Image (tube, helix red, strand yellow):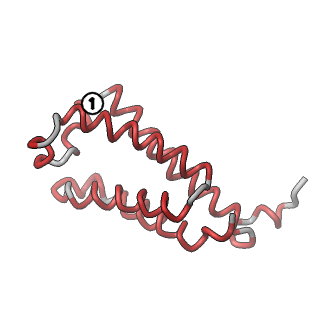
């Protein structure tokens, strides 16, 4: 059994990385599942310009599937730098394309920084 000291994130970067990866994964899985259950609550976050290329509901469904894939990828820890960059870009993109809803999406700022932190913890796995 590991001692309390071994589990302290500031003394164990592997544990810190795992906590961040789980936190990000939960956010992506929650958003994806809720988007399948209540698409009307999420469809407004799909950028308007994308309607010229793809149906908004289909775009939301594809994004939800990708979010579940990304969550699993983050948890696995494989190619962590790449998955962290994609997570940060996705969250940043959501904020960028939804600036009028910053009152809601401002929380994504912390998530972007959490994903970026994984870039510095990658060697900790």
Q: Is residue 52 left or right of residue 107?
A: left
Residue drawn at (55%, 52%), measured in percent from left and top?
Answer: 74
Q: Which residue is mark 1?
A: 39
Can you say which quadrant of the picture contains the C terminus? bottom right
Viewer-proximal residue, 24 or 67? 67
User: Dividing the picture into quarters, in which one does residue 58 lie?
Assistant: top left
Q: Position of residue 124 (x, y in %)?
A: 68, 69
Q: Taking 16 as reference, is 69 above or below it?
A: above
Q: Position of residue 67 (x, y in %)?
A: 42, 43
Point out the residue furthest to the right here: 1
Viewer-proximal residue, 63 or 107? 63
User: Dividing the picture into quarters, in which one does residue 77 lie?
Assistant: bottom right
Q: Is residue 119 left or right of residue 93?
A: right
Q: Position of residue 32 (x, y in %)?
A: 39, 37
Residue drawn at (44%, 67%), measured in percent from left and top?
Answer: 113
Q: Secondary structure at mark 1?
A: helix
Q: Position of residue 61 (x, y in %)?
A: 31, 33
Neighbour tally class for label 1: few under 14, some 14-19, many 20 plus, Cα within 10 Å: some
Point out the residue furthest to the top here: 37
Q: Taking 66 as reference, is 16 above or below it?
A: below
Residue drawn at (23%, 61%), measured in percent from left and top?
Answer: 96
Residue drawn at (41%, 32%), measured in percent from left and top?
Answer: 33
Q: Taking 113 as reference, is 93 above or below it?
A: above
Disc tally is 1
């Amino acid at each position: 059994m590991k001692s309390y000291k071994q589990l302290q994130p500031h003394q164990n970067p592997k544990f810190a990385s795992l906590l961040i990866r789980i936190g990000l994964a939960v956010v992506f899985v929650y958003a994806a599942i809720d988007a399948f259950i209540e698409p009307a609550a999420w469809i407004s976050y799909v950028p308007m310009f994308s309607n010229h290329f793809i149906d908004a509901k289909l775009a939301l469904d594809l994004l939800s599937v990708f979010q579940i894939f990304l969550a699993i990828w983050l948890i696995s820890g494989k190619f962590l730098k790449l998955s962290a960059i994609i997570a940060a870009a996705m969250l940043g993109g959501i904020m960028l394309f939804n600036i009028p809803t910053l009152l809601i999406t401002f929380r994504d700022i912390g998530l972007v920084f959490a994903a970026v932190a994984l870039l510095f913890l990658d060697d900790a796995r």
